[in-house]
Amino acid sequence: MSGRGRLPAGGCAALVLGAALSAGGCGAADDGYDAGTRFPPRADPVVVSPPQTAPAGRYPPGERDKSLLALSGPGAVVYDPSRLSPGDRADLARVLEDLFGTPAAPHVACDQGERAAADGLGLAPERLAAGGKLYKHHCVQCHGMGGDGRGPTGQWVDPHPRDFRQGVCKFVSTPTGKPTREDLLRVLRVGIAGNAMPAFALLPDDQLDALAGYVVYLGLRGRVEFDALAGLLGDGIDEDLPAFARGRLRAEVRAWAAAEGQAVRPGAPPDLNDGARVRSGSALFAGTAGCAGCHADYGRQEQYRYDAWGVPDRPADLTAGDYRGGKESADLFRRVRCGITAAGMPGQPGLTDDQVWDLVAFVRALPAPRDLPPDVRAKVYPGVK
């Protein structure tokens, strides 16, 4: 779970208005990208793994890439794409365009064995073309053309807009970090509390579905590019680049498709206002589940750690009641059961469903001292009657 977002003056409303104006005004028709437009080659650091040490705090505003490039220490593996040879850069651009097309004509060149899975993920060319137009109109201002989270406003938003190119997201219903289609649709419909991601609940379902498919497309393309760059700039690639890229695409399509069968779907919650259940959740939080190790002082103490993108993140202050992954009971159940893999928060596969609900009951009650049993309240809020 992550901390609250910080926005520049004007907040989310200013960003959404800016995105609308850049796309031609609120509700303006958008014809998508020009036929000559190409995805830019990746220029930002490739963080294969961040340092194992804890970061001191957030990166300075506007200095994310500079800070990523400076990552060092035990476990840090970071590559600078500017060091790629011109020949390798040209070869990679050709391979990526062959597999994924262009912004104006997106496609996914799957093998026949993955074609059905790709279509099930919304990757048919006509769906991607529709999704690309919607993405340019609603999303590119923050998330960037290639889904890198580095659109015109992206560098100045904290938390940063999601970089889809890792092929993972934070608030998902699977233990792997791969989102399901419903995970993507949920974020599109309700947004993310505490940051600049707005809700798009007024868009028709078919448009939301097309947008979700386009996010999967950007994740596939970005992951193939990521792995190719890591290989070319690291220990090298043992096979020719086109074969390597096709192999990575094949594996990623399978992983995205497999996520649909890994989703945790909570049943109906029990009585979460039951004091005994809250008390049990408090004990689990401090003991068996190990939550207190990261959420020190219930999250009020800042303890940063690197996420999968190499960006400092802090476990949420659970006494504030701001849940970026959703505040509904089912949302909290998924966060506990699955964890937030991309942020380093482990899931709890060893707990029973009843124990997970106990933790949910405790987390729900934390922001309101009077909702806590007196003995628990004395631990969380000393001196509060």
Image (cartoon, helix red, strand yellow):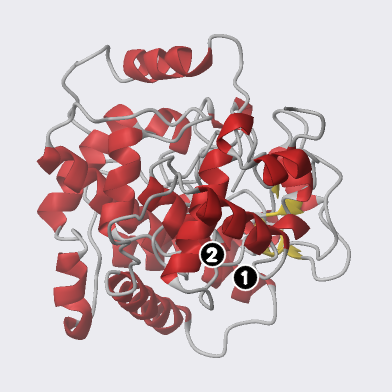
Identify the image quadrant of the C terminus.
top right
Element type at mark 1 = helix
Amino acid on which the number 1 mark rests in the picture? Ala
Residue at left offset 72%, top offset 50%: 295
**Amino acid type, residue under disc 2 in the picture:** Phe
Q: Residue furthest bottom?
A: 238
The disc at residue 152 is none
Tell me, yes or no, whether the two marked residues, 1 and 2, touch with CB atoms within 8 Å. yes
Image coordinates of residue 247 in percent, x first then y, are 39, 83
Question: Which residue sits at x=34%, y=13%?
Answer: 21
**Residue 75 left/right relative to 113:** right
Mark 2 highlights which residue? 226
Q: Is residue 12 visible?
A: yes
Few, some or many residues within 10 Å of mark 2 (<14, 14–19, 20+): many
Disc 1/disc 2 C-alpha distance (Å): 6 Å
- Disc 1: which residue: 230
Nearest the viewer among 171 and 218 is 171
> Position of 190 compared to 353: left or right?
left
For the point 64% across and 82% down, which residue is it? 236
